[in-house]
Image (spheres, rainbow, N blue to C red):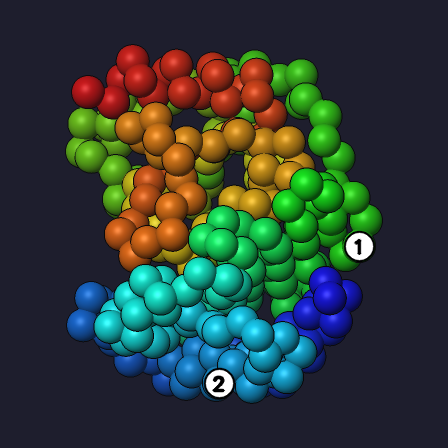
Amino acid sequence: MLEALAKIVRTAAREELLPFFAEAERRYKPDGGIITEADLAMQRRMTRELAVIAPQYRLLGEEMTVDEQNELLQSNVGGLWCLDPLDGTSNFASGIPFFSVSLGLLIDRKPYLGLVYDPIRDECFTAIQGQGACLNGKPLPNVPTGLSLRKVLAVVDFKRLSSHLAVELVSRPPYSSQRNFGSVALEWSWLAARRFQVYLHGQQMLWDYAAGALILSEAGGCMENLDGGAVFLPQLQPSSAVAACDPGLFAEWKHWLVKHKA
């Protein structure tokens, strides 16, 4: 199924997203988020395609109403697709080449399959529970970096953190350098590929992490929320995320955050 899914997502992204890159007219949702016609077209396309390849599973998409999303989560006891048709809409609409399509499959409310596709680089990150993670079909390495926290590149989304923690990170950063790219699903995938090594995000939704967090886990990474609980929960409430690409770095990163977040 994974190969067929990758082909479907690749084709749909090239046809529904790329022609509108940097050209799509943006609108604003009630929560202030940006939406374009490309988001909606991609969700419609994937809804049709997935109904053909796997009609036994329903689909929860970011661009559904909250009532529709809640109904799907509460009624589903088998399998459920979780789709972000365009993760990084602000980047997409502004002409910044960092956005993705994120597709997860939840079986009995647990992540089973994840796929994140970057149409600009034609990079498809995939994972199946218990079978490892891949980039364009080649296994991602699952080995420790050998780096200390002081030497790593971090991706941190400051605007969703408490002001105290944000100030602590800015005034006494424990890492070598910091970035924030603007597509959560792709950030999870780049962490799995060791393109950076530690991650912090204060608030992300189920469709942001359903695929990417599985990809990181299957690549040997570790994650918790800021309170020490699970990142993945089959619910609409947002979750924070503390993550690293290997267990040693995760322990060091988590220790620093526990010490400085209060």
**Residue 187 point in image, percent of width and height:** 52, 47
Point out the image quarter for the N terminus.
bottom right
Left or right, 183 with reference to 204: right
Point out the image quarter for the C terminus.
top left
The residue depicted at 29 percent of the width and 80 percent of the height is: 27
Q: Is residue 207 above or below residue 151?
A: below
Query: Depth check: 148 or 233 in front?
Result: 233
What kind of residue is marked 1? Gly
Task: For label 1, count other residues whose C-alpha is less than 10 Å away and answer few (under 14), some (14-19) or many (20+).
Answer: some
The residue depicted at 42 percent of the width and 82 percent of the height is: 40
**Residue 243 point in image, percent of width and height:** 47, 32
Q: Is residue 242 above or below residue 58?
A: above
- Sequence-wise, the earlier of marks 1 and 2 is 2
Left or right, 74 with reference to 79: left
The residue depicted at 20 percent of the width and 66 percent of the height is: 31
Residue of label 2: 44
* Residue furthest front in the image: 77
Q: Is residue 219 above or below residue 122?
A: above
Secondary structure under tag 2 reads: helix
Q: Is residue 67 above or below residue 170?
A: below
Residue of label 1: 137
